Image (cartoon, rainbow, N blue to C red):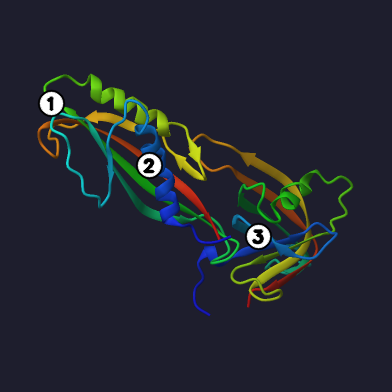
Amino acid sequence: MATIRGESGSVQFETGSGSLAAVVGTRSWSLTTTKETLDTSVHGNTFRQFVGSMISGSGTVELVYDPDATGQAAFIEDVVKTGDAADASFELFTTGSSSGSDSVAFGGIITDMEISSTVGELVTVSCSYITSGTITSNLE
Amino acid sequence: MAAADLNTIRATIEGRLATELAKTPPTPVVFHNMPFEPTPNGSFVQCLTSFGSSEYLSHGLSANSRNRIVGLVVINIFSGKGVGPGANYVIGKRIRDLYNRVNVSGVFFDAPIGPEALASPAPEGYFQTQVRVTFESIEEL
């Protein structure tokens, strides 16, 4: 595998009632994964020690807004889903669209949606999410 | 979706101009790679449509993706020499109004530039102004 350009990526999503499918018109995604740490330093230690603890993730997906593009409406309207059981699934691909390959998969909740319309520019949407449960990394 | 047909985009732009200039008072219009013999001291319009650089807008490679295609329409307006700019600017207004804040068949036009008077008309023997309009079309693959 060589280096990868961003345009080869993609985003797949399902709201919890279907199967993962491409969201057409995404132009960027990001994921930040964080592992908390627990301090296990004890008396006598001269250097602080830690063990890894809870892992969580968050990120954004940006779209070029097109109300007719497959998957966009379900994605950007997930933020107004009430009683959200974190049953939505995401798979973010660096390249291709084969499940479990060059991707990160997780369940999550869309926590923010911002749509902007500016004179002379394309209408864009930016959604933020947090992960819930296991993050499966297939980036190797 | 399919790759954008550049000829369709060109036809959209040029057809709009040809239709307008066929109305009363009609003004001859010539496009790229067409023979034309202007009438001395008469008015005519030359429309040159060119495509420029494209831009990847979205993820997805050759499927489920969006590209931005941009281009430029240069419209040269020629009118009689030595009789002032009025007749020329009448045509210029008609052309500017054709593209100003317009979205036709998926072709978005930016704010027109001009008509600008040119110091060295080509061909010589006319008063020449120029209207330039950049445009963009979103290709859906």
Same-chain check, marks 2 and 1 = yes
State the residue position of label 3. Answer: A31
State the residue position of label 1. Answer: B81
Question: For numbered disc 1, what is the local secondary structure?
Answer: loop
**Whole-percent x, y for residue B14 in the image:** 37, 43
| Residue A98 disc label | none
Question: Label 3 sits on what residue type?
Answer: Leu
Subunit under mark 1: B
Which of the 4 quarters of the picture holds residue A43? bottom right
State the residue position of label 2. Answer: B134
Question: For numbered disc 3, what is the local secondary structure?
Answer: strand
Give the residue displayed 64% in from the left and 41% down from the top: A115
Question: Label 2 sits on what residue type?
Answer: Thr
In this rendering, the answer to whether A96 lies above or below B104 is below
Note whether residue B112 is visible.
Answer: no
Which of discs 1 and 3 lies nearer the camera? The answer is: 1
Which of discs 2 and 3 lies nearer the camera? The answer is: 2
Number of residue marks: 3
The extreme bottom residue here reads A1
- In the image, taking residue A43 as reference, residue B8 lies left or right, namely left
Subunit under mark 3: A
In this view, the residue in front, A50 or A119, is A119
Which of the 4 quarters of the picture holds residue B124? top left
Q: How much space separates mark 1 and mark 3, taking CA atoms? A: 65 Å
Which of discs 2 and 1 lies nearer the camera? The answer is: 1
Q: Residues within 10 Å of mark 1 (few under 14, many from 20)?
A: some
